[in-house]
Image (spheres, helix red, strand yellow):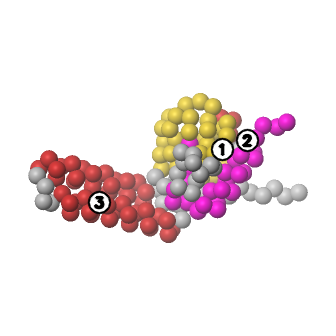
Amino acid sequence: MTEIPPPILAPTPFRTVTGLSVMVALAALLFNAALPLGIVGQALLIAAALAALALAFAMWRGRGDSLHWTEAGLTNAAGRVIAARSAILSVDRNPMALKPSNGFTIHLDAKEPQAWQPGLYWRIGQRVGVGGLTSPGVAKALADRIALDTAPVE
């Protein structure tokens, strides 16, 4: 019997353009709102606008990245392990869970260093959030595959 290859999760072009547009529009609005304010208000709003532009740049930089389910675990396109297969305790797709939009959360058995690719994944402590600018159907298929492959054998 032929094994079905796991799905590859990548940001979709439409969602990437939408996310970038929102961040650039936010930066423009913040710059515009800073004009009539005093020096302290201007400094705060300009700092927030620059942060929005930095986030947009990070999203742009990661537009070609993708997540793969391999023997090592969940890795990005460069082969960096995001969640080791042996460290995964569970996968949570509950709508009320702390997770990215259209994505899922992976619970790990130990804390890992923080990592983040805007619109694709974040890792904080014992949680890895996957999704954001990705297709909901592909994210669901990947979550199901990870849950199936890491389920305890009875």
Vertical position of residue 25 compared to residue 115: above or below: below
| Figure quadrant of residue 12 | bottom right
Mark 1: few, some, or many residues within 10 Å (few <14, many ≥20)?
many
Mark yes or no: residue 48 visible: yes
Stretch in magenta:
128-154
Residue 139 placement, left or right of 112: right
Mark in the foreground, 2 or 1? 1
Q: Are marks 2 and 1 in contact (CB under 8 Å)?
A: yes
Label 3 to label 1: alpha-carbon separation = 35 Å
Q: Are marks 3 and 2 in contact (CB under 8 Å)?
A: no
Residue picked out by circle 3: 27
Mark 2: secondary structure: helix
Residue 144 placement, left or right of 100: right
Residue picked out by circle 1: 91
What residue sits 56% from the left and 35% below the top?
126
| Figure quadrant of residue 86 | top right
**x, y percentage for residue 129?**
55, 46
Residue picked out by circle 2: 150
Q: Amino acid at mark 2?
A: Thr
Q: Amino acid at mark 1?
A: Val
Q: Amino acid at mark 3?
A: Ala
Label 3 to label 2: alpha-carbon separation = 42 Å
Q: Which quadrant of the rendered structure holds the N terminus?
A: bottom right
Q: Residue furthest right?
A: 1
